[in-house]
Amino acid sequence: MFKNIDFQLKDYNPTPPSLVCCTEEGNKNASVKVDLARLFHHYYLDTRGYAPPDPDLARFEHLSLFTTDKEFRVRGDGFGTGLAFRRSTSNQLGQAFCRWFLYEHLNITYFAHMDAVLNRPAHPNSIGHEVFRVSPGDAPDYLCAQDRSSVFLAEAKGRSKSISFKNAEFNKWRKQFDRVGIRDASGTLISAKGHIVATRFATEADGKKVKSKLYAEDPDSPGETSLREAPQLANSVIALHYAELAAKIRQPILSNSLALNLQVPPEIQFPAFVWEFLSPPLSGKRFVGGFYPGREGIAPLEINLNNERTVFLNQNPLRLDLTPATFFGVEEAIFSGLCSIARGGDELAKDLPPFPEIAFFDSAVSVLRDGSIVAPVNYLSPIGLRIY
């Protein structure tokens, strides 16, 4: 399922290749499609430590607050009635849109919350770049990485009021980049490329002429020289990104090791359940993870086939209204690599195998380049317990 959102860019030179074809009149009046399953996937990774509130991608909890139009339009005059709920919902969706935009159109795969970056101790033997707080106040939301060397700062905003690159609010958001700094091993302040992604959510009360719109700007943080490569920082971002995924698949020791930069002794092993995807385009691909029951809370029916495969059906296969259980996991080779990082340190992030981009094939399935997957459990068959 897709919805459309308008967008406008500032200081992106050149324009991201994926947006060139849908840009009109010099980055104005352009729109882009949003895969709602992927938007939910980013929202889940960003906000939920464990189980999502409703694991069915087709029932993304905030979608009920939007109309059924092809464009994003909030019902009534805003998200709910209470001011606190409206602000919280706008911020959560703003962060989901930020991660979605940077992932889809700027090839940024890994995200670490800034508070986790600032609080994460460096390895005693590490030499490289460091992120530090310059002054109190709101800092950018994320330190993110495109690959094992390129890192960026990112700030996400979401609101129902008007947004403009020229208004006072946007200028306040720019100043957040002044509150953190990056320095190299010699103590020299380094300037890093940043991204501000602010999403204005139009409401029914605004009228049809006002549309939801995403505003993206490409500022730099203060510094004496530009940041070229920062493998240590990128490795930290990757470790923090996967720490949250490890928590979701119930691997607390692995999660804590990645989050706190603590190496586990060799005798610590990681037992995990492996599943195999049964359908193209992921036939034979294996993932580590598990499932959450459907919204009725009923565990699925486990059936052993003659070919020794196990499949899952709804508890009552005669009923077509029951929702399937939802699988969440991470690709097996990547999971194995994370266990190696936990034992050997962040620098082993360079050995994580890449996961290819998977083209859209089902609105109930989302697979990201970090190897994480959300899908109906019917697509997968359990292989068995493995020790890593």
Image: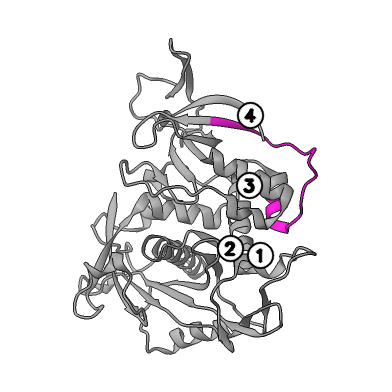
Q: Nearer the viewer, mark 4 or mark 2?
A: 4
Q: In the rendered view, how is the structure colored?
A: one colour
Q: Is residue 384 left or right of residue 25?
A: right
Q: Choose between 198 and 280: the one closer to the eye.
A: 280
CA distance for labels 1 and 4: 30 Å
Q: Are marks 2 and 3 in contact (CB under 8 Å)?
A: no
Q: Are marks 2 and 1 in contact (CB under 8 Å)?
A: yes
Of labels 4 and 3, earlier in sequence is: 3
Neighbour tally class for label 1: few under 14, some 14-19, many 20 plus, Cα within 10 Å? some
Secondary structure of the residue carrying tag 2 is strand
Element type where label 1 sits in the image? helix
- Is residue 98 placed above or below 46 in the rendered structure? below
Please give the range of residues in magenta: 255-274
Q: Mark 1 or mark 3, which is nearer the start of the sequence?
A: 1
User: Which residue is located at x 26 percent, y 71 percent?
Assistant: 211
Which residue position is annotated with label 1? Answer: 116
CA gap between label 4 and label 3 equals 15 Å
Q: As rendered, which of 352 and 120 lies closer to the eye?
A: 352
* Disc marking residue 112: 2
Q: Which residue is mark 4?
A: 386
Tag of residue 338: 3
